[in-house]
Image (cartoon, rainbow, N blue to C red):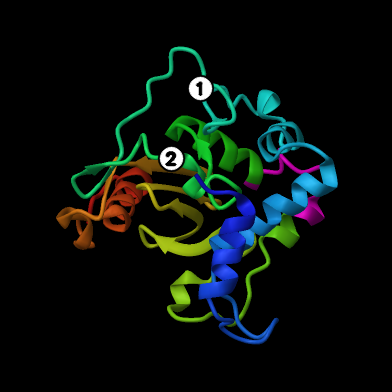
Amino acid sequence: MWTRAEQIELAMTFGPPLTAPGVQFSYSDTGYVVIGELIENITGLPLATAVRTLLDFDRLGLTRTFWEKVEPAPEGLARAGQYFGDLPVARIEPSADLFGGGGLVSTTEDLVRFLRALLRGGLFAYPETLAAGLMTPAVSIGDASHIHSALLRSKVIGGRPCWSHGGFWGVQVVHFADADVTLALSYNQVKCDAQTSGEIGRDGLVDRLARITLTGRSG
């Protein structure tokens, strides 16, 4: 069982700085763990309660989204199995990824509902907040396709620009602003042979799904 402080300490001990501050961007789950700590200190609320309250899950209709371990699962909601290769992991101790880098359990329907509210102006009180959240750094460490704003990643999927976010456990949600179309994909096995193929893996599947949805053609 992990604590937030232990995870931050682990990163500080075994993860040397990549660059000086402000030089380059690199996506960091640990950064979101630190943000979780800031949210709790500023609001005086547990992270799950603060997120649910500040984002107003009830108003958004996120009835099937909850924070693992610290909130009860919605009644009647059966959780799908999750596998790392052939290893079932849905019942591992969730504090391994609970404090801001992860922790939420949801459905594809709720993911679509949330992303549409976010990008169509239905979440933040001020448009400037969304604009700031979508500011994308010019220089990234490693693959340029991994450049990420504070909220989402700008990508080209199905031959069209979109905002996207993916999770380690086989989920990706994308929004095509020009077509006002939002798609979510989820599968429950990662690190399997099928995932190594761009044609069959998550990126290949969402690309094909986007092409079919937006153009009616799979190629």
Which sits in the foreground, 9 or 114? Answer: 9
* Residue 206 is covered by the magenta coloring: no
Quarter of image, res 92: top left
The residue that mark 2 highlights is: 93
Examine the residues drawn in magenta and state their main secondary structure.
loop
The amino acid pointed to by label 1 is: Ala
Quarter of image, res 71: top right
Which span is picked out in magenta?
119-129
Check residue 88 in the rendering and tell me which mark sits there, or answer none: none
Quarter of the figure that contains the C terminus: bottom left
Which sits in the foreground, 68 or 150? Answer: 68
Label 1: few (<14), some (14–19) or many (≥20) C-alpha neighbours in 10 Å: some
Task: Say left or right for 97 vs 121.
Answer: left
The residue that mark 1 highlights is: 73
- Taking the view exactly as shown, the residue that stands out farthest to the left is 193
Residue 52, position as x, y percentages in the image: 68, 32
User: Eyeballing the image, is 187 above or below 25?
Assistant: above
Give the mark, 1 or 2, whose residue is nearer the N terminus: 1
Label 2: few (<14), some (14–19) or many (≥20) C-alpha neighbours in 10 Å: few
Residue at image coords 71%, 43%: 121
Asked if residue 1 shows in the view, the reply is yes
The amino acid pointed to by label 2 is: Glu
Residue at image coords 50%, 57%: 162
Q: CA distance from mark 1 to mark 2?
A: 16 Å
Which sits in the foreground, 50 or 162? Answer: 50
Quarter of image, res 34: bottom right
- Nearest to the eye among marks 1 and 2: give it: 2
Residue 186, position as x, y percentages in the image: 35, 41
Residue 63, position as x, y percentages in the image: 57, 22
Asked if residue 126 shows in the view, the reply is no
